[in-house]
Amino acid sequence: MLKTTLLKATEASGKILQQYFNGSFEVSSKSTINDLVTEADKKSEAVIIDVIRAAYPDHFILSEEVGEMKTASNVKWIIDPIDGTVNFANGIPICCVSIGVEKDGEMILGAVYNPFMNELFLAEKGKGATLNDKPIHVSVKSNLATSCLVTGFPYKWNQGPRDPMQVLDHIIREGIPVRRLGSAAIDLCWVACGRFDGFWEHELQAWDSAAGFLIVEEAGGKVSDFSGNRYSPYQKEILATNGHIHSALQDLINNGK
Ligand code: IPD
Ligand code: CA
Ligand code: CA
């Protein structure tokens, strides 16, 4: 069963994260000096792929560090072996493994596991979302002015209208509390369980959001791009909210006040 394999893979990865955390490990840079990959990312990815391959040798895999392992299968596993690598490398326990399963182009399963808080978020299309086996729901807050928001920033961006600093400027000028955790997958899960009312980010990759966006939707939230179109993890912008503040936050992102 897909779910059994998914849980086995997240558990195996969680053990690796715990094993390496705060130890000494190799760290190197990728697209920019602060876009990091550690030995633990690679090891986590290897154990996840081993678990999937043992159960489903022919499934398509898209994983951050190794890229695409294409097959003709209609099932694709989308893996972020550590989301929040900068946190991980600095001994900050806000990081996780994130795995989404897509079938016929639709996300059907997602798991995000932060072993340091022992929090496993799970969603199955049409069956709701859970945190450590208990059902979760987005918040009921409907006033953007009193919402608690979270965002993240790309490692590099070009300045321009609606760039990350301008959007942040619009929101901060309203006096709305904004947090930056450093893991998009955890940001999404914390919207799903009502800790945050909304999250936006400009430039995510499929592995950052594949599992988390399904978890938000299954917890009753709304996920779109900045124009309000239905979300796809293959485009960069993401706006995920409890649904009630969605259009107000979308307007603020796009136009300010
Ligand atoms: C990053 C985190 C971060 C987000 C970045 C991502 P990584 O993923 O999700 O919160 O702001 O855009 O790249 O590099 O830690 O896997
Ligand atoms: Ca990531
Ligand atoms: Ca990563």
Image (cartoon, helix red, strand yellow):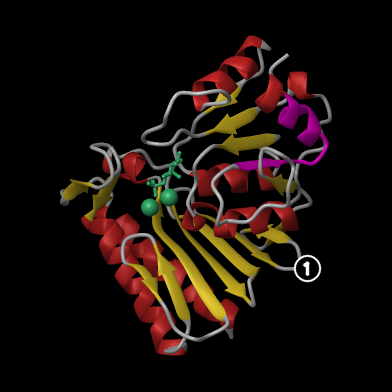
Q: Is residue 119 visible?
A: yes
**From the viewer's perspective, is residue 28 above or below residue 214?**
above
Screen quadrant of the N terminus: bottom right
Q: Position of residue 63 (x, y in %)?
A: 40, 65
Screen quadrant of the C terminus: top right
Q: Residue at x 30, y 71 (%)?
A: 46
- In the image, the segment drawn in magenta is 238-251
Q: Residue at x 70, y 60 (%)?
A: 129
Residue type pointed to by label 1 = Gly
Q: Is residue 196 visible?
A: no
Q: Position of residue 252 (x, y in %)?
A: 71, 23
Report the front residue among 50 and 23: 50
Report the front residue among 140 and 63: 63
**Direction from residue 196 to residue 205 in the image, left or right:** left
**Direction from residue 36 to residue 256 in the image, left or right:** right
Q: Examine the structure image and report whether residue 162 is included in the region drawn in magenta.
A: no
Q: Position of residue 151 (x, y in %)?
A: 55, 32
Q: Examine the structure image and report whether residue 246 is included in the region drawn in magenta.
A: yes
Residue under pointer 1: 126
Q: Quadrant of residue 144?
A: top right
Report the front residue among 26 and 158: 158
**Direction from residue 122 to residue 114 in the image, left or right:** left
Q: Quadrant of residue 161?
A: top right
- Quarter containing ligand 1? top left
Q: Residue at x 84, y 30 (%)?
A: 142
Q: Secondary structure at mark 1?
A: loop
